[in-house]
Image: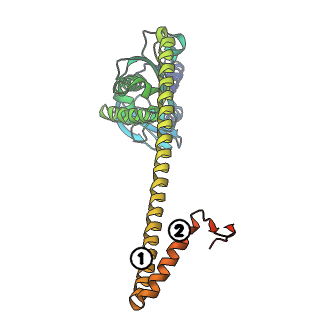
Amino acid sequence: MNPWDNNSNDNEDFVKNIQNLLNQKKREFFNGNNFKFNPVILLVLVFVWLGTGFYTVKPDEQGVVLRFGKWVRSTNPGLNYCLPYPFEKVIIQSVTNIRRIDVGMKAYRDNDEQSENLMLTGDSNLANVSFTVLWKIKHDGVEEFLFNARSPELAVKACAESVMRSAVGKNEIVYVQTEGRAEIAAEVKEELQKLLDEYNTGVEIVQVNLQNVEPPFPVIDSFRDVERAQADQQKSVNEADAYKRNLLAKARGESAEILNNAEGRKKSMIEEAKGATARFLSVYNEYKTAKSVIAKRIYLDTMKEIIKKSNLVLIDEKNGVLPHTSF
């Protein structure tokens, strides 16, 4: 029930019925000079009138009591009482009912370009943006909801559209269409709640859902062609990056293999040099003790190695070429 409405309530109808009854009894009591006053009937009527002040507030509701149109108090769930009409009046509102406002949905379905959903993005593109706002009355904000705005629904819608335009205007259209949807919706919910709190509307924003983000209908086909071209370009770039990474990994592997082989060869040559040095020193020490014997042995060992690598032919003066065996 909106306090700005001029419709009468049930109490008004009841009072009218009481007034009609009183007028009828008045005609009966004051018929000619036969005046007859019945205080019992009057007392009953007074009690019935006082009984109209009782009212019930459900667990999910809050009541607001107006005295001659001015707020005097709020009432909690349960059985309550206020002065009967015309002294006081009760307005009851649900504080748990989730209400919904769609912005841009009709225009999106009807392809209407001159509509509330046509917004400018951060990269200077126009986009058809449609979204949904879920809201409810604050548990302690019924008074603000009833008296601070003539039409709270229109206030929520206007503020939501303004905040959404600001959020979309800071981002590129591709970001709004893809990974930025959840972040933008959360940002709009937070900023919208702050704005409504500044206006003391008594409204709590439950959720903001970003529905559709599309380019204007006359250019949507061209825009999608551009999107496909950009997707192909990105695919080629990704493939080139993958090929590059593959080549680099292969080159690093080959480089590591060459370094490992070189390191192994280096260690092997060092060990061979150490072994040859040890053998030379061993022979040299023996040579110092028996020079003639060791010199002859070295000579024979050396000739043996040379002969192994040479073609040896033995010729005898009498027998000619003789068979021989390798050393």
Element marked by disc 1 = helix
Q: Position of residue 255 (x, y in %)?
A: 45, 50
Q: Position of residue 313 (x, y in %)?
A: 62, 65
- Residue type of the residue flagged with mark 2: Ile
Element marked by disc 2 = helix
Q: Position of residue 5 (x, y in %)?
A: 43, 20
The image quarter containing residue 2 is top left
Determine the CA span between mark 1 and mark 2: 21 Å
- Residue type of the residue flagged with mark 1: Thr
Taking depth in this image into account, of 217 and 194 the one nearest to the observer is 217
Q: Which residue position holds label 1? A: 277
Q: Which residue position holds label 2? A: 306
Taking depth in this image into account, of 123 and 80 the one nearest to the observer is 123
Q: Is residue 208 visible?
A: no
Vertical position of residue 3 compared to residue 282: above or below: above
In the picture as drawn, the residue positioned furthest to the bottom comes out as 289
Q: Quadrant of the C terminus?
A: bottom right
Q: Position of residue 65 (x, y in %)?
A: 40, 35
Identified at 50% across, 15% down, the residue is: 225
For label 2, the crowd category at 10 Å Cα-Cα, with few meaning under 14, some 14 to 19 and many 20 or more, is few
